[in-house]
Amino acid sequence: MNLIELRGIQKYYGDYHALRGIDLDIAEGEFFSLLGPSGCGKTTLLRVVAGFEDVSSGSVMISNKDMTGVSPNKRPTNMVFQSYAIFPHLSVAQNVAFGLRKRSDLNAQARMTLVEDALDMVGLDGYGARAANALSGGQRQRVALARALVLRPKVLLLDEPLSALDKKMREQMQVELIRLQRQVGITFILVTHDQEEALVMSDRIAVMFDGEVAQIAEAEDLYRKPVSRRVAEFIGTMNFLPATVAGEKVEVAGLGHMELSDTQSMATTDGDTMAGFRPETATLLFPGQKTEGRIASGTVSEVVYYGDMTYYDVTLDGCERPVRISMRNVFGRPVLDIGAPARLAWSPGAVTLFARA
Amino acid sequence: MQQETKRGLGLIAPPFFYAVLLMAGPLLAIVVFSFWTQDYLTVDRTPTIANYVEAFGDPIYRAIMGRTLWISGLVTLITVLLAFPVAYFVSFHVDPSRKSLWLFLITIPFWTSYLLRIFLWKVILGYNGVLNSILSYINVPLEAVGNATGILWMQEGLSAPLYSASAVVLTLSHAFAPFAILPIFVALEKIDRSLLEAARDLGETAVTAFIRVTLPLAAPGIVAALLIVFIPTVGDYVTPAQVGGPGGLMIANMIQTQFLGLNNAPMGATLAVIAMLIVTVIALATVWLARRLSGVR
Amino acid sequence: MLRAYVVAFLIFLYAPIALLPVFAFNSGTVIAFPLDGFTLDWFAALRTNSELHSALLNSLTVAGTTSVLSVLLGLMAARANIRYTFPGKAAAMGLVMIPLVLPEIIVATSLLVVVVQFFGWSLSLVTVVAAHVLICTPFAIAILNASFQSLDPALEEAAIDLGETRSSTFRLVTLPLIMPGIIAALLICFTISLDEFIIAFFLTGSDTTLPVYIWSLLRFPNQLPVIMALGTILVIVSILILTLAEWNRRRGIARMGGKDSGGFL
């Protein structure tokens, strides 16, 4: 059953068209991400759901109730702000208890229990009396989560919640957010510009560009079957080569002929298209190494050594721009030098065809 | 969006209409009033430019206007020159945690009893004053100090030191010093310190880096300081009245006399309008000139 | 060398004020060196001067009313300035801030002309308050602008998101967080109004304010030591108020977790 239904959401700021007809369904208990570069409208869309922005046209339904004209304090949503918005004049416990003020059914004892449980849930048990200012970034994040979750909203909205944290802390909080979401079973909507974060955490992801949804898919589908070159470029890295489609035959520069049915095709017409493949789907063969698959040849033009991985730029014969290949540095495998001849093992199944943009 | 606009307009309305009612309206009124005339207690409402003709024609008014501009200009220059090193010191040489304490120390005198501060200069500079009594106590006549330092009013002797334009300049420079320090300090604080290091790295000396980097970047603060000192000094009443004597009176004193002494309010209004116009023209000219000079950017 | 100059500058800055207590406790009636002896007579004379007491009371009333009204207007303007966009905002804000750069004699005479010549009303402490509010409001706006500026808008949104209404959000979140700014603005406006002479001189009726009363005393040489005593008290009170304002401002910054950028303005 769909908890949230967005229909034809349009939003103008003066002449600026921020949201251009968004349709979205989000299921109950789902961890859903809005992913896109800055300025794509993802935060605006989140604030539309929260009620902080009214729409120019279209409708927001939550639990089959029309939310038009319902102010943020009356919506069954709560938000974790990008800056966390921890009230600096209140203690940690007072922050968490903030939204419980209007709950007249609770006595002081019950309120305290709820606050303590919420703090416990985010791993801050015993921090209640601390001043909010004395907290680290990660702790503020947890207070913000506890403060929203203690109200048991139908939807928790997270606006770039991890962007202010350093890399280690971010990875730790990603895992915790997943755990927390499974534990409470509340629908989470996460806004992020970090594709890795979205891939790691979400059940489904909506990729947004320029106020429109480009693709909605599960993480793996999004990575393996991007619908457009733009999505493919935004999610991870992809090599692009000019290709020509003629009936059932495809000719890709540098790789050669293949059957259309062997590839994933997002292109709808014959003629000039773009073929793409991910760096990890091809393998550089080392002198003497054999393979069952198809081989393309070229020259190593750049080597970047990352410790566990080596990234090679290989200029395929008949191509101007090099393709990038990532190789795991297995023990005993030599690292090729710039200028060395390269043999590239690849398979048509990893090639995706896009309309030439 | 619509709602937000309404809220903003609703909030700005009370202070806006207050300013319209108590400032814009009265300013308009004083302009209208300056075209009327007054004979003893009866006001003649026939519009005439007689007051302006008189204000610009009568040598007394011209002298006062000239002196006002001369004194204010001098005070402004002296104050900003005195203030710059202090602002520079606080911005560049004071530990960041103690900067606000220094600013506090500098601003305190500005907020405390303006009237008494001016009066105390009268006490210090006057005949039988502190300066004179200290000097005579240690047996150094003021004239000698004057001759040694070249300060004119000291050379002229004790009979007149206080009641002169110099005393007004000294007192006003003292009164507005903190006002000049703040904007310069703010401008200096905004200067990225690595710019100076970059200048040194590119071969400038400390002095040339100051001239080629610090000074141009501090220019907006200096212009603000010039204006913030000049504008109120043009309209200052207390200082010339207290320490100026007949040779140090300024336009505000004349306005006051017209309104409260001579019962020629329209003439007072005319002088007020002229003072306002002069201030506006000079302020705009300064800003324009500053923009031109920094137009290289 | 720069340090020596700055120290000399500070001495120059404080010299007149430092003389106040020297002569306030000096038993000689002439304000000159050498000093005669120690006395508290001048302070004692202050206690019995009923004219002074009524002038002081007038000044306190004017300053109190002025500071409250200025801060209320300042709150509205600063809030509108920082939180909202609306047509004509820059022009409206510019107009409201103009008194900051308008010579006070102009404010005084223009209001005098309107009140007396156009409306024929009588002058009173009300006209003084009206003018003082005009010149104090820009200072209140400047201080409160900084307060609203350092207030993360997400804090108010968070309160609304957590179920509060606009008005309860203002009471529970906004007000406590900008309170140090409000107090600082109140104190500064109070000090400005208490100290203001020229506008009060033009616009006061039969009730005088303290500076106007002091001005009337300055003409009498035998009153000078008493003025010194009064001045000493006034300076101490002003410094106390300003210290309070500054302390408050710093506390506010510390509370917001921000960093001190220094100064009232």
Image (cartoon, rainbow, N blue to C red):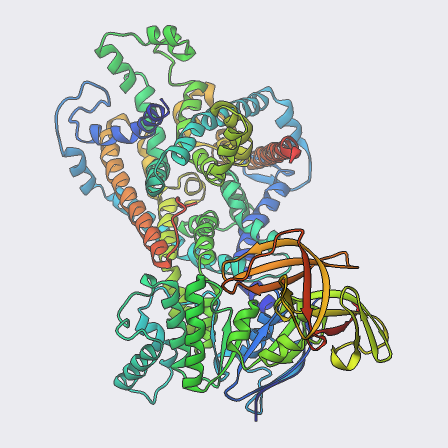
Q: Is residue B264 visible?
A: no
Please tell me whether residue B98 is drawn above or below residue A289 in the rendered image: above
Please tell me whether residue A256 is drawn above or below residue C62 in the rendered image: below
Q: Is residue A88 visible?
A: yes
Q: Quadrant of residue C40?
A: top left
Q: Is residue B172 left or right of residue A114?
A: right
Q: Position of residue C236 (x, y in %)?
A: 25, 40
Identify the residue at the far bottom of this view: A1
Q: Residue at x 58, y 55 (%)?
A: A304
Q: Residue C6 versus residue B16: which sits nearer the camera? A: C6
Q: Residue at x 57, y 39 (%)?
A: B42
Please tell me whether residue A160 is drawn above or below residue C256 in the rendered image: below
Q: Is residue A114 left or right of residue B4?
A: left
Q: Quadrant of the C terminus of chain A?
A: bottom right
Q: Is residue A246 left or right of residue A237?
A: right
Q: Quadrant of residue A46?
A: bottom right
Q: Quadrant of the N terminus of chain A?
A: bottom right
Labels in figure, total: 0
Q: Position of residue A35 (x, y in %)?
A: 59, 72
Q: Position of residue A276 (x, y in %)?
A: 71, 69
Q: Position of residue B131 (x, y in %)?
A: 29, 17
Q: Residue A211 versus residue A322: which sits nearer the camera? A: A322
Q: Residue A78 versus residue C103: which sits nearer the camera? A: A78
Please tell me whether residue C254 is drawn above or below residue B239 in the rendered image: below
